[in-house]
Amino acid sequence: MSERTPGFSTLAVHAGAQVDPATGARVTPIYQTTSYACENVDQAALLFDLRNLGNVHTRLGNPTNAVLEERIAALEGGTAGVVTASGHAAQVMVFHCLLQPGDEFIAAKGFYGGSINQFNHAFRNFGWNVVWADPADISSFERAISPKTKAIFTESIANPGGVITDMAAVAQIARRAGVPYIVDNTLATPYLCKPIDHGADIVVHSLTKFLGGHGNSIGGAIVDAGTFNWSRERRYPMLCEPQAEYQGIVLHETFGNFALAIACRVIALRDIGAALSPFNAFLILAGIETLPLRMRKHCDNALAVAEWISTHRKVAWLSYPGLPGDRYHNLAKKYCPKGAGAVFTFGLKGGYDAGVKLVSKVRLFSHLDNLGDNRSLIIHPASTTRRLLSDAQKIQAGAGADVVRVSIGIEDAEDIIADLDQALAD
Ligand SMILES: *Cc1c(COP(=O)(O)O)cnc(C)c1O
């Protein structure tokens, strides 16, 4: 009998996990330990020189986290993964492995506000200079390339504007420039979209959102696609030059197609230290087991709710790539054929006051700044997350006075619609 390649739902339940060899526990236990005893001096020397890979200290790795790393890498189709304390930590650590002060990277504007802040503030302080391109105009990525460009970064589905990035086109530009293409796949999850199939070299995640799914744990992940030739490009010293503190080994020579994941662990996690708690890894693993079921329900509900909202007399516009007629509908069909996710924005004819009234009157929806929760969530950015921006900046950030963002949960669609109906009533 030939070996079957397991399907996505099977991997979501099983990838990376096995019966615990010490106890027989069927569910991956929480290895709540900071460190691991050395077997003997020789074995310890091999571990510390990176000649063997194994457990040393939970800042660098942990058996519960390792199952989560293997599972996410399997779902994305990558060679290896590293989990981190948050999505933002994953982004800092990837760029730490690629950029030096004075380098540039290109990012798609109009995406997740937290990442815009991180790139414009913390990253500029490190001397990593973001150059913004427009995901609606792919040639703007080409024009942004300079000799200092070291990476291109986009989201698959961009939060919150409902932009679907033409990843295959961006990947071609990255190939021609000889730089890796990084995709934040948080909003789509690998169930809806696999960026590596479309040319991404690295995938990052906020596990805080749909992958964990239950609104109970912050976490992040980096997946190495194993596709980028670090030795050929020679512009990434951490990957292609000898590492003095590890006996002069060259990571790409020693670890080949998972060298970036190793660099994220043995250099970025070691020095930046944003490790994931094994308790959070346990909760996120439990969440991922039901990812396909939840995403199907999220997408069905989002489509039903978007259809209902788009015809409401108080609504001026709605942007959801899952709806026929949306400007990103064709790209959604190409990149996210199973559904366009569950986060979208719409505009109220009544502007700022109408937005404030809506978020004040909802009962089933939670009024908060998160997304990808089983619960339906709503936020009016102009009065909350973006209240300190000028009016012009608000509009540029897709957070004009009239904009409301929702993340549709897995409750019954009829109840979600009934809640909006009562909250929008006069
Ligand atoms: C939330 C989010 C992040 C940041 O993740 P944290 O886990 O909150 O640090 C990054 N990208 C996207 C698209 C997000 O939605």
Image (tube, helix red, strand yellow):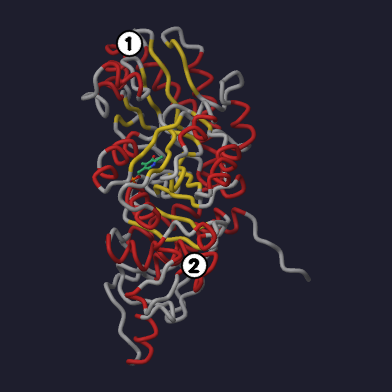
Vertical arrangement, residue 53 with respect to residue 337, above or below: below
Q: Which numbered tag is attached to residue 351? A: 1
For mark 2, does the 10 Å Cα neighbourhood hold few (<14), some (14 to 19), or many (20 or more) residues?
A: many
Q: Nearer the viewer, mark 1 or mark 2?
A: 2
Vertical arrangement, residue 146 with respect to residue 326, above or below: below
Which of the 4 quarters of the picture holds residue 405?
A: top left
Count of number-bearing discs: 2
Circle nearer the N terminus (1, 2): 2
Find disc 2 in the rendering and name its residue.
252
| x then y, percent, for residue 325 | 60, 18
Mark 1 residue element: helix
Looking at the image, which residue is at 32% across and 63% down? Answer: 269
| x then y, percent, for residue 91 | 37, 49
| x then y, percent, for residue 244 | 34, 74
- In the image, 300 versus 201, the foreground residue is 201
Looking at the image, which residue is at 34% across and 71% down? Answer: 31
Work out which quarter of the rendered image holds the C terminus and state it: top left
Q: Which amino acid type corresponds to the residue marked 1 in the rendered image?
A: Gly
Query: Marks 1 and 2, how far apart in space?
Result: 54 Å
